Image (cartoon, coloured by chain):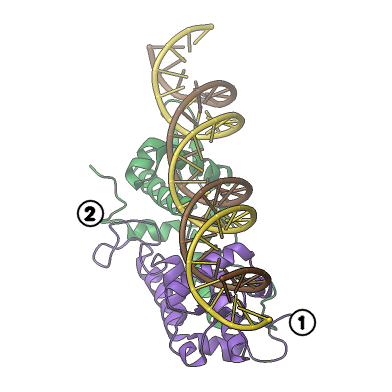
Chain colours: A green, B purple, C brown, D yellow
DNA sequence: CTTATAAAAGATATTTTTATCTTTTATAAG
DNA sequence: CTTATAAAAGATAAAAATATCTTTTATAAG
Protein backbone atom coordinates (compact mmCIF):
# COMPACT_ATOMS: atom_id res chain seq x y z
CA UNK A 1 0.00 0.00 0.00
CA UNK A 2 2.66 2.47 1.10
CA UNK A 3 6.34 2.42 0.15
CA UNK A 4 8.86 1.40 2.77
CA UNK A 5 10.07 5.00 2.87
CA UNK A 6 6.57 6.07 3.72
CA UNK A 7 6.18 3.47 6.43
CA UNK A 8 9.48 4.54 7.96
CA UNK A 9 8.34 8.15 7.75
CA UNK A 10 5.03 7.56 9.46
CA UNK A 11 6.61 5.53 12.23
CA UNK A 12 9.29 8.19 12.68
CA UNK A 13 6.78 11.02 13.02
CA UNK A 14 4.77 9.07 15.58
CA UNK A 15 7.90 8.36 17.56
CA UNK A 16 9.14 11.94 17.42
CA UNK A 17 5.72 13.16 18.53
CA UNK A 18 5.71 10.80 21.45
CA UNK A 19 9.18 11.84 22.54
CA UNK A 20 8.34 15.51 22.24
CA UNK A 21 5.29 14.92 24.40
CA UNK A 22 7.60 13.39 26.98
CA UNK A 23 9.81 16.48 26.83
CA UNK A 24 12.62 14.91 24.80
CA UNK A 25 14.31 15.77 21.57
CA UNK A 26 15.30 12.61 19.75
CA UNK A 27 18.08 11.76 17.30
CA UNK A 28 18.11 9.91 13.98
CA UNK A 29 19.85 7.06 15.72
CA UNK A 30 17.26 6.75 18.43
CA UNK A 31 14.35 7.11 16.01
CA UNK A 32 15.75 4.46 13.68
CA UNK A 33 16.36 2.03 16.48
CA UNK A 34 12.99 2.60 18.13
CA UNK A 35 11.05 2.26 14.90
CA UNK A 36 13.11 -0.59 13.49
CA UNK A 37 14.22 1.33 10.45
CA UNK A 38 17.61 1.67 8.73
CA UNK A 39 19.45 4.57 10.30
CA UNK A 40 20.92 6.51 7.37
CA UNK A 41 17.84 6.00 5.27
CA UNK A 42 15.65 7.21 8.09
CA UNK A 43 17.89 10.26 8.27
CA UNK A 44 17.07 11.07 4.66
CA UNK A 45 13.37 10.73 5.29
CA UNK A 46 13.56 12.91 8.39
CA UNK A 47 15.34 15.53 6.27
CA UNK A 48 12.45 15.50 3.85
CA UNK A 49 9.85 15.73 6.59
CA UNK A 50 11.77 18.62 8.14
CA UNK A 51 12.03 20.50 4.85
CA UNK A 52 8.32 20.03 4.41
CA UNK A 53 7.70 21.43 7.83
CA UNK A 54 6.14 18.31 9.34
CA UNK A 55 8.69 18.08 12.12
CA UNK A 56 11.34 20.48 13.39
CA UNK A 57 15.02 19.79 13.71
CA UNK A 58 17.80 21.37 15.68
CA UNK A 59 21.42 20.85 14.74
CA UNK A 60 24.35 20.38 17.07
CA UNK A 61 24.76 19.19 20.62
CA UNK A 62 21.46 18.66 22.43
CA UNK A 63 19.84 18.88 19.05
CA UNK A 64 17.46 16.44 17.45
CA UNK A 65 13.94 16.22 16.09
CA UNK A 66 10.70 17.35 17.62
CA UNK A 67 7.11 18.18 16.83
CA UNK A 68 5.05 20.24 19.23
CA UNK A 69 1.77 18.80 20.42
CA UNK A 70 -0.25 21.69 19.03
CA UNK A 71 1.20 20.91 15.63
CA UNK A 72 0.43 17.20 15.86
CA UNK A 73 -3.24 18.18 15.85
CA UNK A 74 -2.87 19.83 12.45
CA UNK A 75 -0.70 17.28 10.66
CA UNK A 76 -2.71 14.65 8.83
CA UNK A 77 -1.40 11.25 7.80
CA UNK A 78 -2.29 12.18 4.24
CA UNK A 79 0.31 14.96 4.30
CA UNK A 80 3.09 12.58 5.29
CA UNK A 81 2.04 10.11 2.61
CA UNK A 82 1.87 12.85 0.00
CA UNK A 83 5.34 14.15 0.85
CA UNK A 84 6.97 10.74 0.67
CA UNK A 85 4.90 8.77 -1.86
CA UNK A 86 3.36 11.61 -3.82
CA UNK A 87 -0.16 11.30 -5.11
CA UNK A 88 0.05 7.90 -6.75
CA UNK A 89 -2.18 6.42 -4.08
CA UNK A 90 -4.93 8.89 -4.93
CA UNK A 91 -4.70 8.93 -8.69
CA UNK A 92 -4.67 6.50 -11.55
CA UNK A 93 -6.72 3.52 -12.59
CA UNK A 94 -6.62 0.15 -10.83
CA UNK A 95 -5.64 -1.47 -14.09
CA UNK A 96 -3.16 1.31 -14.87
CA UNK A 97 -5.14 2.65 -17.81
CA UNK A 98 -4.61 6.29 -18.66
CA UNK A 99 -7.92 6.65 -20.44
CA UNK A 100 -9.94 5.39 -17.51
CA UNK A 101 -12.40 7.82 -15.91
CA UNK A 102 -16.02 8.09 -14.86
CA UNK A 103 -17.20 8.58 -18.45
CA UNK A 104 -15.15 5.74 -19.85
CA UNK A 105 -14.47 3.50 -16.87
CA UNK A 106 -12.39 0.36 -16.76
CA UNK A 107 -14.10 -2.79 -15.47
CA UNK A 108 -13.12 -2.23 -11.84
CA UNK A 109 -13.35 1.55 -11.87
CA UNK A 110 -16.25 2.08 -9.49
CA UNK A 111 -15.25 -0.47 -6.90
CA UNK A 112 -11.73 0.83 -6.99
CA UNK A 113 -12.81 4.43 -6.53
CA UNK A 114 -14.80 3.44 -3.45
CA UNK A 115 -11.90 1.66 -1.83
CA UNK A 116 -9.46 4.39 -2.59
CA UNK A 117 -11.70 7.13 -1.36
CA UNK A 118 -12.11 5.38 1.95
CA UNK A 119 -8.35 5.06 2.19
CA UNK A 120 -8.04 8.72 1.35
CA UNK A 121 -10.58 9.76 3.89
CA UNK A 122 -8.88 7.63 6.52
CA UNK A 123 -5.59 9.40 5.84
CA UNK A 124 -7.20 12.82 5.76
CA UNK A 125 -9.10 12.40 8.99
CA UNK A 126 -6.29 10.90 11.03
CA UNK A 127 -3.90 13.37 12.60
CA UNK A 128 -0.55 12.64 14.21
CA UNK A 129 -2.25 13.60 17.48
CA UNK A 130 -4.84 10.86 16.97
CA UNK A 131 -2.10 8.31 16.42
CA UNK A 132 -0.23 9.57 19.44
CA UNK A 133 -3.26 9.16 21.68
CA UNK A 134 -3.82 5.63 20.49
CA UNK A 135 -0.18 4.90 21.21
CA UNK A 136 -0.26 5.89 24.87
CA UNK A 137 -0.43 2.90 27.11
CA UNK A 138 2.13 0.55 28.57
CA UNK A 139 2.02 -2.14 25.93
CA UNK A 140 2.12 -0.20 22.72
CA UNK A 141 4.47 -1.36 20.04
CA UNK A 142 5.82 1.97 18.91
CA UNK A 143 6.85 2.85 22.42
CA UNK A 144 10.52 3.19 23.19
CA UNK A 145 12.09 -0.13 24.07
CA UNK A 146 13.81 0.00 27.42
CA UNK B 1 -1.95 -0.39 -5.25
CA UNK B 2 -0.88 -3.10 -7.67
CA UNK B 3 2.56 -3.47 -9.27
CA UNK B 4 2.93 -2.62 -12.94
CA UNK B 5 3.41 -6.32 -13.64
CA UNK B 6 0.08 -7.00 -12.02
CA UNK B 7 -1.67 -4.27 -13.98
CA UNK B 8 -0.24 -5.64 -17.21
CA UNK B 9 -1.35 -9.11 -16.19
CA UNK B 10 -4.93 -8.11 -15.41
CA UNK B 11 -5.26 -6.17 -18.63
CA UNK B 12 -3.78 -9.08 -20.58
CA UNK B 13 -6.20 -11.61 -19.13
CA UNK B 14 -9.17 -9.38 -19.90
CA UNK B 15 -7.95 -8.94 -23.44
CA UNK B 16 -7.30 -12.63 -23.97
CA UNK B 17 -10.75 -13.44 -22.62
CA UNK B 18 -12.35 -10.97 -24.96
CA UNK B 19 -10.51 -12.36 -27.95
CA UNK B 20 -11.36 -15.92 -27.04
CA UNK B 21 -15.00 -14.93 -26.77
CA UNK B 22 -14.70 -13.57 -30.30
CA UNK B 23 -13.25 -16.87 -31.44
CA UNK B 24 -9.64 -15.70 -31.74
CA UNK B 25 -6.39 -16.83 -30.28
CA UNK B 26 -4.13 -13.88 -29.65
CA UNK B 27 -0.36 -13.42 -29.55
CA UNK B 28 1.97 -11.69 -27.11
CA UNK B 29 2.50 -8.99 -29.67
CA UNK B 30 -1.19 -8.31 -30.11
CA UNK B 31 -1.90 -8.44 -26.39
CA UNK B 32 0.92 -6.03 -25.60
CA UNK B 33 -0.13 -3.59 -28.24
CA UNK B 34 -3.82 -3.74 -27.35
CA UNK B 35 -3.20 -3.29 -23.64
CA UNK B 36 -0.44 -0.73 -23.99
CA UNK B 37 2.15 -2.88 -22.27
CA UNK B 38 5.80 -3.63 -23.09
CA UNK B 39 5.91 -6.67 -25.32
CA UNK B 40 8.69 -8.85 -23.95
CA UNK B 41 7.74 -8.09 -20.40
CA UNK B 42 4.13 -8.95 -21.10
CA UNK B 43 5.40 -12.22 -22.55
CA UNK B 44 6.99 -13.06 -19.22
CA UNK B 45 3.81 -12.29 -17.36
CA UNK B 46 1.76 -14.39 -19.78
CA UNK B 47 4.19 -17.25 -19.15
CA UNK B 48 3.51 -16.99 -15.46
CA UNK B 49 -0.24 -16.86 -15.93
CA UNK B 50 -0.06 -19.88 -18.20
CA UNK B 51 2.04 -21.88 -15.75
CA UNK B 52 -0.48 -21.03 -13.06
CA UNK B 53 -3.27 -22.22 -15.26
CA UNK B 54 -5.10 -18.92 -15.56
CA UNK B 55 -4.90 -18.87 -19.34
CA UNK B 56 -3.93 -21.49 -21.90
CA UNK B 57 -1.24 -21.19 -24.51
CA UNK B 58 -0.55 -23.00 -27.74
CA UNK B 59 2.89 -22.92 -29.34
CA UNK B 60 3.69 -22.71 -32.98
CA UNK B 61 1.86 -21.43 -36.04
CA UNK B 62 -1.75 -20.49 -35.37
CA UNK B 63 -0.84 -20.63 -31.71
CA UNK B 64 -1.41 -18.00 -29.09
CA UNK B 65 -3.21 -17.45 -25.81
CA UNK B 66 -6.78 -18.16 -24.89
CA UNK B 67 -9.12 -18.63 -21.97
CA UNK B 68 -12.43 -20.36 -22.41
CA UNK B 69 -15.56 -18.54 -21.33
CA UNK B 70 -16.52 -21.24 -18.85
CA UNK B 71 -13.19 -20.76 -17.17
CA UNK B 72 -13.52 -16.97 -17.02
CA UNK B 73 -16.42 -17.56 -14.63
CA UNK B 74 -14.15 -19.36 -12.18
CA UNK B 75 -11.09 -17.12 -12.30
CA UNK B 76 -11.17 -14.36 -9.70
CA UNK B 77 -9.16 -11.17 -9.89
CA UNK B 78 -7.68 -12.12 -6.53
CA UNK B 79 -6.02 -15.15 -8.14
CA UNK B 80 -4.27 -13.04 -10.74
CA UNK B 81 -3.10 -10.56 -8.13
CA UNK B 82 -1.88 -13.37 -5.89
CA UNK B 83 0.10 -15.00 -8.69
CA UNK B 84 1.83 -11.80 -9.73
CA UNK B 85 2.07 -9.70 -6.56
CA UNK B 86 1.85 -12.44 -3.95
CA UNK B 87 -0.01 -11.81 -0.75
CA UNK B 88 1.57 -8.53 0.24
CA UNK B 89 -1.68 -6.73 -0.45
CA UNK B 90 -3.50 -8.91 2.04
CA UNK B 91 -0.95 -9.12 4.79
CA UNK B 92 1.17 -6.83 6.84
CA UNK B 93 0.61 -3.70 8.83
CA UNK B 94 -0.05 -0.28 7.30
CA UNK B 95 2.94 1.09 9.14
CA UNK B 96 5.04 -1.96 8.25
CA UNK B 97 5.25 -3.22 11.81
CA UNK B 98 5.83 -6.93 12.27
CA UNK B 99 4.37 -7.01 15.76
CA UNK B 100 1.10 -5.42 14.74
CA UNK B 101 -2.05 -7.52 15.15
CA UNK B 102 -5.51 -7.36 16.67
CA UNK B 103 -4.17 -7.86 20.19
CA UNK B 104 -1.40 -5.32 19.87
CA UNK B 105 -2.55 -3.06 17.06
CA UNK B 106 -0.70 -0.13 15.56
CA UNK B 107 -2.50 3.23 15.56
CA UNK B 108 -4.12 2.72 12.16
CA UNK B 109 -4.69 -1.02 12.46
CA UNK B 110 -8.48 -1.14 12.50
CA UNK B 111 -9.09 1.40 9.76
CA UNK B 112 -6.48 -0.27 7.65
CA UNK B 113 -8.00 -3.71 8.11
CA UNK B 114 -11.36 -2.37 6.98
CA UNK B 115 -10.00 -0.88 3.81
CA UNK B 116 -7.96 -3.89 2.95
CA UNK B 117 -10.75 -6.32 3.55
CA UNK B 118 -12.99 -4.39 1.19
CA UNK B 119 -10.23 -4.49 -1.41
CA UNK B 120 -9.85 -8.20 -0.79
CA UNK B 121 -13.53 -8.85 -1.10
CA UNK B 122 -13.67 -6.81 -4.30
CA UNK B 123 -10.90 -8.94 -5.79
CA UNK B 124 -12.46 -12.18 -4.56
CA UNK B 125 -15.92 -11.42 -5.86
CA UNK B 126 -14.90 -10.17 -9.28
CA UNK B 127 -14.34 -12.84 -11.91
CA UNK B 128 -12.73 -12.42 -15.30
CA UNK B 129 -16.20 -13.06 -16.70
CA UNK B 130 -17.57 -10.08 -14.78
CA UNK B 131 -14.87 -7.87 -16.21
CA UNK B 132 -15.49 -9.21 -19.67
CA UNK B 133 -19.20 -8.41 -19.50
CA UNK B 134 -18.50 -4.88 -18.36
CA UNK B 135 -16.10 -4.51 -21.25
CA UNK B 136 -18.56 -5.35 -24.00
CA UNK B 137 -19.82 -2.26 -25.74
CA UNK B 138 -18.57 -0.12 -28.56
CA UNK B 139 -16.70 2.46 -26.54
CA UNK B 140 -14.79 0.38 -24.07
CA UNK B 141 -11.17 1.21 -23.53
CA UNK B 142 -9.78 -2.28 -23.40
CA UNK B 143 -11.32 -3.11 -26.72
CA UNK B 144 -9.02 -3.82 -29.62
CA UNK B 145 -8.03 -0.66 -31.42
CA UNK B 146 -8.87 -0.87 -35.11
C1' DC C 1 11.24 -34.12 -43.15
C1' DT C 2 11.63 -29.16 -43.65
C1' DT C 3 10.14 -24.62 -42.83
C1' DA C 4 7.84 -21.05 -40.54
C1' DT C 5 5.63 -19.50 -36.48
C1' DA C 6 4.88 -18.53 -31.77
C1' DA C 7 5.48 -19.48 -26.91
C1' DA C 8 8.99 -20.94 -23.20
C1' DA C 9 13.16 -20.39 -21.11
C1' DG C 10 17.32 -18.23 -20.05
C1' DA C 11 20.53 -14.37 -19.98
C1' DT C 12 21.25 -9.61 -19.66
C1' DA C 13 20.16 -4.58 -19.21
C1' DT C 14 17.88 -0.55 -17.34
C1' DT C 15 15.39 1.99 -13.92
C1' DT C 16 13.64 2.76 -9.45
C1' DT C 17 13.76 2.07 -4.72
C1' DT C 18 16.18 1.28 -0.76
C1' DA C 19 20.32 1.92 1.76
C1' DT C 20 24.92 3.49 3.19
C1' DC C 21 29.03 6.34 3.53
C1' DT C 22 31.43 10.81 3.51
C1' DT C 23 31.67 15.74 3.87
C1' DT C 24 29.65 20.04 5.26
C1' DT C 25 27.04 23.11 8.24
C1' DA C 26 25.07 24.71 12.55
C1' DT C 27 25.33 25.20 17.39
C1' DA C 28 25.93 24.36 22.38
C1' DA C 29 29.32 24.36 25.97
C1' DG C 30 33.73 24.96 27.89
C1' DC D 1 37.80 30.42 19.71
C1' DT D 2 37.88 25.43 20.03
C1' DT D 3 35.72 21.14 20.50
C1' DA D 4 32.11 17.95 20.32
C1' DT D 5 27.68 16.83 18.62
C1' DA D 6 24.03 16.19 15.49
C1' DA D 7 21.50 17.28 11.33
C1' DA D 8 21.99 18.51 6.19
C1' DA D 9 23.79 17.61 1.94
C1' DG D 10 26.05 15.07 -1.46
C1' DA D 11 28.04 10.91 -3.44
C1' DT D 12 27.88 6.14 -3.97
C1' DA D 13 26.18 1.26 -3.45
C1' DA D 14 22.97 -2.59 -3.28
C1' DA D 15 18.62 -4.65 -4.14
C1' DA D 16 14.30 -5.04 -6.42
C1' DA D 17 11.30 -4.12 -10.17
C1' DT D 18 10.83 -3.40 -14.86
C1' DA D 19 12.27 -4.37 -19.44
C1' DT D 20 14.71 -6.40 -23.42
C1' DC D 21 17.33 -9.71 -26.16
C1' DT D 22 18.73 -14.41 -27.47
C1' DT D 23 18.18 -19.32 -27.68
C1' DT D 24 15.27 -23.32 -27.29
C1' DT D 25 11.07 -26.01 -27.78
C1' DA D 26 6.66 -27.25 -29.76
C1' DT D 27 3.73 -27.61 -33.64
C1' DA D 28 1.09 -26.66 -37.90
C1' DA D 29 1.42 -26.90 -42.80
C1' DG D 30 3.54 -27.90 -47.05
- Residue occupying image coordinates x 64% and y 67%: B37
- Residue occupying image coordinates x 47% and y 93%: B70
Residue ID for mark 2: A138
Q: Position of residue A62 (x, y in %)?
A: 41, 29
The front one of D7 and B29 is: B29
| Quarter occupied by residue A145 | top left
Label 2 neighbour load within 10 Å: few <14, some 14-19, many 20+? few
Q: CA distance from mark 2 to mark 1?
A: 65 Å
Decide if residue A19 is on the left or right side of residue B4.
left
Image height of C15 relative to A41, above or below = below
Numbered tag placed on residue A102 in the rendering: none
| Quarter occupied by residue B82 | bottom left
Nearer the observer, disc 2 or disc 1?
1
Decide if residue A89 is on the left or right side of residue B97.
right
Q: Secondary structure at mark 1?
A: loop
Q: Secondary structure at mark 2?
A: loop
Mark 2 falls within which chain? A
Q: Quadrant of the C terminus of chain A?
A: top left
Mark 1 falls within which chain? B
Q: Is residue B119 visible?
A: no
Please, which residue is most extreme toward the right here?
B146
Q: Position of residue B138 (x, y in %)?
A: 72, 90
The front one of B136 and A36 is: B136
The front one of B87 and C22 is: B87
- Residue occupying image coordinates x 55% and y 78%: B13
Numbered tag placed on residue B146 in the rendering: 1
Mark 2 and mark 1 residues within 8 Å of each other at the beta carbon: no
Q: Position of residue A41 (x, y in %)?
A: 46, 41
Q: Is residue B72 visible?
A: yes
Label 1 neighbour load within 10 Å: few <14, some 14-19, many 20+? few
Amino acid sequence: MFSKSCEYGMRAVIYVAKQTSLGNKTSVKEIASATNSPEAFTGKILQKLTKNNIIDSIKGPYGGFLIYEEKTKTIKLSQIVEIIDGDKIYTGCGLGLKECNAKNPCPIHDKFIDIRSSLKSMLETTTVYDLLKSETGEDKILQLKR
